[in-house]
Structure formats: C-alpha cells, structure tokens
Image: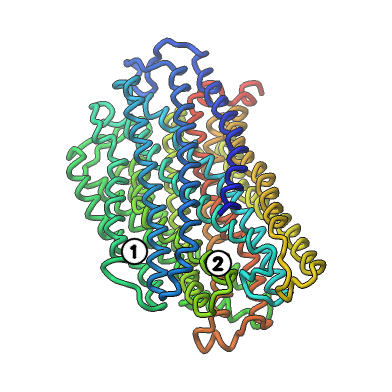
C-alpha cells in the first residue's frame, strides 16, 4: 500500500506540472481567437445572435480542463486505496471459502465503480450549473467550454494508464522470467525480489489507470453529446432537461448497476469455483436488460416527442423513441463485444485451449497461435461497432453516435466492478503466497483470479468499443465546430492526414512496448543479481531487497511515460496549427480506424496468453493435465507467451483507446483556434 501511494504521489507531481502548462496553453490559444477581445461575438451557428466573448470561453475551458484532470486523478487515487484495503481482506475471507472471498473482492470493485460513475456525473452537473450563471442562454458557449472537462479527464488517464502500465509490467515480466522460468519457484513467492513491485503495479496500473481511463471515456462521451445538443433544437428552445439527457442516461445507469450488484452478492450466492465466472457474466446481462427499460423510461419522460438535431449545417427531425434506439444499440453492442472478448480470452473455450495446446512444441508456436487469435478476435467487435454507427447515425446524426457511446458506458459501474475484481483477486493470491498461507487458500484465490482475467478483458473490450464511438462523436462535433463542410478523402490535404493518423497508434505502441522492454531488462538483471549474490535467498533464510526493484519500476515508468504522452498531446496542436482543420480531420479519422483494431487485438492476445498459462497451471481437465505440471517445458513456453502478452494487454492495448479519444477531444477544444488561425504552412506555400 505504501509503495502504491508513494508511486502515485510521484507520478502526480509530474502530471501536476503538465496540467499547469497545458492549462496556460488552452487559455492562450483560445483567448487569441478574437485577439483577447472582451466584446460579444456573433454566434458560430446562428449569426443573428450574439454570444459571450472568446476570452471568457477560453477562461472557462481552462477551468473545466483543470476540474476534469483533478476529478480523474482523485478517481484513480481513491480506486487504488479501495483496492489496497480489499486485497488483504479477500485473502482472509478465502480461509472461510471461495464464496466469501468472491463477495469481498466483488463488493470492493463495486465501491470503486459507483465512486467513479457518480463523482464524474456530480462534478459535471455542478460545473454546468455554475457556468450557466455566467452564460445564461448562450448554450453554445457554455457547452463549448465544458468540453475542457473531457480533455482534462482523458489527459490524466493517458499518463495514469501508460505510467501505471509500464510500472506493473516491468515488475511482472522480471518476476516471471527469472522466478518461474529460470529458478522454478512459484508465482508471488516472497523469495522473488520483484514480487512487491509486481503487486504494487497491479494497483497503480490495473486499478488507478483503468479507473482514470473509464472516467475519461464517460466525461468525453457526455461532452460530445452535450455539444451537439446545445446547437440542436434543445438549445434553440432552451430545453435544459432535453439537453441534459446524456447525464440522465448515466444517472439511471448508476441506479440500474446498484440493483444488478445485489444479484451477485445477495440474491444468489457463489458457493463453488465453477459458479464464479457465470456470476460475473450474469452481471453484464442483467445490467443490460434492466438498463434497456431504464432508457425507455427516461426517453419517454425527459424528451419532447419530436425535436431537431444539428447535422452538419442542417437540422434533422428525430423522435424520442429514435434516441431510445440509439442508446440501446450502443448498450447491446457493448454486451456483444463483451461476450466475443470472453470467448477469445477465457480458458473455458477452444481458442485459448488451442493456444495452450500449441505450447507442446515450444514458445514460438504459442506466440504464432496467440497473435492469430488476437487478429481474429477483431472481426465481430468491428462489425458490432459498424452496425451501431450506421443505425445511430441514420436515426439521429452525430448526436445518435454520441448517445450510443453513452449507452455502452451507461453500465460503467458494473463494468468497473467486474474489472477491478480481477486485480484485487490477483493481489489476494500474492498476499496468500507471501504470507505462507495454506495451498488451499492459494487455489481459491487463483480460481477467483482466472475468472477475473477474463472479466478484465471484457472491461477492456467495453473501453475500446466505447472509445471508437466516443471519438467518432467528438470527430463529428469537431468538424461542425471547425466549419469543415465535407471531409474529402481524395483531397491531398486530407489523405496525408489520414495516412499519418493511421501510423500514430503503431508509433505509440512501439514507444510503450519498448519502455516496458527496457524497464523489464533492468528488472531481470537486478533479480538475477540478487539470486546470485545474496546467500541463503533461494533457501528462504535471507530476505531479498524489494526496495531496489520498486525503485527500478518507479523510475522507469515516470521517465518513460512522458514521450508517448507528448506524442498524443502535441500531434493535434502541431497538425491543426501548421496544416489546418482538413488535414487534422484526416489524422483523427486515420488514428480512429487503425487504433481500434490494434487495441482490440493487443488486449485479446495478451488475455489469451495469460489464461492459456493459467489453464496449464490449474490442470482442471484431462487435456490440461497432459500439458502440465508447473515447471514443465510446456508450462515454461506458456509463461514466455504470457510475458510477451503482458505489455500488450496492460500497457499498449488499453492506452490506445485513450489515444484516439484524447486526440479527438483535444481537437474539439482547440477547434475555434484551428478554424481561425490554423493551416499556417498552406497559407504561405
């Protein structure tokens, strides 16, 4: 716990400096749109009306950026605190049986889920109402300044995910390669010097990073929907309830998730290992079904029967039931993505069992099978995303896509509960091993963790699917705000942006993977050094030097998170300023299209390799027993696959969904500046 807290405080010091600098950049760029004038300006969408000065929008955008950033940091920190308290409690409950341990881990995850979903909603609602005191009926200016909230949430999530991911995976790879492959000692054995760093990493990467990430998704999808609503008939008619429909969807989601949680902990009790995974899957199904009724209710109560939605210069007429379908299709597409992810990453199904079977001929075939599985797992989620985009756009233009993304995220509290449950169970196993508790307790925590691995992959699937919809909605809002009438792929300005944008996720992945690799290299050397030079370490009579390993992970993650973060944050600023809004729209489209594919394949490949290793270790079926036991050549090949998959599923994959959202929301925030001052190179060429 001390390690996790001290790492986060160190990380937050660096991130605080970045926040301050970027806040100044936002104010200067947006303030310069009208030359820092304090006079009212004609509105962007209705030229006959006057809106508040650009200088004040710059000021309020800066404030909302800082609010989003602080909320994101606090969410990650509190989530980490909850997890560190829950780890030991889950281990102690495992003495009484698997059911008790499951309830403790799940409830802890649920506390984090509700905390995140509600804090994001409350801060956003209060911010809107406070800003409204100044803006009055200028909805356009109000919601344009609110977009800074999504930018703040996502930029902190990027550093949390990348920094935490590098920290945890450097320790994990170092601990596995030396401990399990070279020295043949169990996972989380206290003799292994990297074990403490690994357990700390689970809290800062999988809990704090993931919490900030999903908070960012939620903040951005709300902001995208609010911006489009403000220039639709909701804004023209001053229908505040209609405009707050995105917030109402999220509010109903929290109530639905509260009821859903009772099904896992109170109405039905988990009594055996085989009931764990079905109990977690039922959470997804129950929350989706209940949420469908919830959406129908608020669509009927909060929205007028007919209204218009802004659609690239025209107003499109939509009915309240049309919006119900948009939100529902996002919600059910999320469930489909979740189940496809589960099929490809759970060791109960043939894809992972085939990967485990391929370990018989060594690590190379394991890697080939794992990569093939990841690429194949992209197909159905992409079709699900494509169908939801087409249907929701046909019904309600860009607003439809924004609320579909909110639909996918509406059950975020349940998604986070089952996602955070995984790392909590994993660390409970680590504590059991290090405390020298009985073999039976370790078996129970391993069973909880194996189910948690799959649900963590499902959580990542949700995050990536919603990121695709969110960034498309933000892209639509950006194109409207920047005054781009049509994005013509055949135009050279757009095409160069498209091809560079498609390259960015590869560049970003290369940076994060290499960071994990170089940090893991130092970790392996340090762990080997300690095993070779500390007498009595292997026999258990001497204590390893955990602090040095923690320091290696901390230093590497703080240093290495800056270049990938800078790449994502500077790209829209440089492209928009030098090349203009058309090239930037190409960059955003390219990054979205390639980023989603790489993110899904990376996180599913990593999840499959991890569960193939666990399948061999557990030896639960006849087939698994022919591949094992622990320490066999087959198991060592599986461990190598798992260590390759670690940075894919916990660093590069999850960070990519932040890349595509963050670039889109940043472009939207700076759209007024790019539209008036951007494209410097093309102006002078």
Q: Which residue is at the far right?
A: 533
Along the viewing direction, whichever of 532 and 405 lies nearer the viewer: 532
| Disc 2 crowd, CA 10 A, few/some/many (<14, 14-19, 20+) | many
Say left or right for 11 vs 261. Answer: right
- Residue at (54%, 74%) from the top-left corner? 437
Say left or right for 252 vs 107. Answer: left
The residue mark sitting in front, 1 or 2, is 2
- Residue at (25%, 55%) from the top-left corner? 292
Residue 347 visible in this rendered orientation of the protein:
yes
The vertical placement of 400 against 285, above or below, is above
Could you tell me which secondary element the residue under label 1 belongs to?
A: helix
Say left or right for 582 vs 308. Answer: right
- Residue at (44%, 39%) from the top-left corner? 474
Could you tell me which secondary element the residue under label 2 belongs to?
A: helix
Tag 1–tag 2 contact (CB < 8 Å) = no
Residue 525, image x, y percentages: 78, 62
Residue 417, image x, y percentages: 40, 58
As measured in the structure, the alpha-carbon distance from the residue carrying label 1 to the one carrying label 2 is 27 Å
Along the viewing direction, whichever of 418 and 432 lies nearer the viewer: 432
The vertical placement of 488 against 680, above or below, is below
Residue 44, image x, y percentages: 39, 22
Quarter of the image where the N terminus is located: bottom right
The vertical placement of 157 against 63, above or below, is below
First of labels 1, 2 by sequence position: 1
Task: Please give the residue where the numbered disc 1 appears in the rendered image.
Answer: 283
Residue 190 figure quarter: bottom right
Residue 379 visible in this rendered orientation of the protein:
no
Residue 563, image x, y percentages: 67, 42
Say left or right for 564 vs 310. Answer: right
| Disc 1 crowd, CA 10 A, few/some/many (<14, 14-19, 20+) | many
Task: Please give the residue where the numbered disc 2 appears in the rendered image.
Answer: 431
């Amino acid at each position: 716990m001390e390690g996790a807290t001290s790492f986060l405080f160190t990380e937050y010091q660096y991130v605080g400096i970045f926040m301050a600098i970027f806040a100044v950049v936002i104010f200067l760029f947006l303030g310069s749109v009208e030359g820092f004038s304090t006079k009212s300006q004609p509105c962007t969408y209705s030229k006959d009306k006057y809106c508040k000065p650009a200088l004040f929008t710059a000021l309020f955008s800066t404030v909302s950026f800082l609010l989003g950033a602080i909320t994101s940091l606090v969410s990650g920190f509190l989530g980490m605190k909850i997890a560190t308290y829950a780890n030991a409690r889950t281990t102690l409950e495992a003495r009484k049986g698997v059911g008790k341990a499951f309830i403790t881990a799940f409830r802890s995850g649920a506390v984090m889920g509700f905390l995140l979903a509600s804090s994001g909603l409350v801060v956003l609602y209060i911010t809107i109402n406070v800003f409204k005191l100044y803006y009055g009926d200028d909805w356009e200016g109000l919601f344009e300044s609110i977009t800074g909230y999504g930018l703040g949430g996502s930029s902190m999530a990027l550093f949390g995910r990348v920094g935490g991911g590098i920290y945890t995976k450097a320790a994990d790879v170092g601990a596995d390669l030396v401990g399990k492959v070279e020295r043949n000692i169990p996972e989380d054995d206290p003799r292994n010097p990297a074990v403490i760093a690994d357990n700390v990493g689970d809290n800062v990467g999988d809990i704090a990073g993931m919490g900030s990430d999903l908070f960012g998704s939620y903040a951005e999808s709300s902001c995208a929907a609010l911006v489009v609503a403000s220039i639709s008939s909701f804004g023209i008619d001053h229908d505040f309830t209609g405009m707050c429909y995105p917030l109402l969807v999220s509010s109903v989601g929290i109530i639905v998730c509260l009821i859903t949680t009772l099904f896992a902990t109170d109405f039905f009790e988990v009594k055996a290992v085989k009931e764990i995974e079905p109990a977690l899957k039922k959470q997804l199904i129950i929350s989706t079904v209940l949420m469908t009724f919830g959406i129908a209710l608020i669509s009927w109560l909060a929205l007028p029967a007919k209204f218009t939605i802004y659609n690239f210069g025209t107003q499109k007429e939509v009915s309240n039931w049309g919006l119900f379908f948009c939100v529902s299709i996002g919600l059910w597409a999320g469930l489909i993505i979740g189940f496809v992810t589960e099929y490809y990453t759970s060791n109960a199904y043939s894809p992972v069992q085939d990967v485990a079977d391929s370990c018989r001929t060594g690590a190379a075939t394991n890697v080939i099978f794992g990569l093939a599985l990841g690429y194949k797992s992209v197909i159905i989620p992409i079709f699900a995303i494509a169908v939801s985009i087409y249907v929701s756009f046909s019904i309600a233009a860009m607003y439809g896509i924004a609320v579909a993304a909110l639909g996918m995220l509406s059950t975020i509290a349940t998604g986070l509960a089952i996602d955070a449950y995984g790392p909590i169970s994993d660390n409970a196993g680590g504590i059991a091993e290090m405390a020298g508790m009985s073999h039976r307790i370790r078996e129970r925590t391993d069973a909880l963790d194996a189910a948690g691995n799959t649900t963590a992959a499902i959580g990542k699937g949700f995050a990536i699917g919603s990121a695709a919809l969110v960034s498309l909605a933000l892209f639509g809002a950006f194109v409207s705000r920047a005054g781009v009438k049509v994005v013509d792929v055949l135009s050279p300005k757009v095409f160069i942006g498209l091809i560079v944008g498609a390259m960015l996720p590869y560049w970003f992945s290369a940076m994060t993977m290499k960071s994990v690799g170089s940090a893991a290299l130092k970790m392996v050397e340090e762990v080997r050094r300690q095993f070779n030079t500390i007498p009595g370490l292997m026999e258990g009579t001497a204590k390893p030097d955990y602090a040095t390993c923690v320091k290696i992970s901390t230093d590497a993650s703080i240093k290495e998170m800056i270049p990938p973060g800078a790449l994502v944050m500077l790209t829209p600023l440089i492209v928009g300023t030098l090349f203009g809004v058309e090239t930037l729209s190409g960059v955003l489209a390219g990054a979205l299209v390639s980023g989603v594919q790489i993110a899904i394949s990376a996180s599913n490949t990593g999840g499959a390799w991890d569960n193939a290793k666990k399948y061999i270790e557990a030896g639960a079926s006849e087939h698994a027993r022919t591949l094992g036991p622990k320490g066999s050549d087959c198991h060592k090949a599986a461990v190598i696959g798992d260590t390759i998959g670690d940075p894919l599923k916990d660093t590069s994959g999850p960070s990519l969904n932040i890349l595509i959202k963050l670039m889109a929301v940043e472009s939207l925030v700076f759209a007024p500046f790019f539209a008036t001052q951007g494209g410097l190179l093309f102006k002078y060429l």
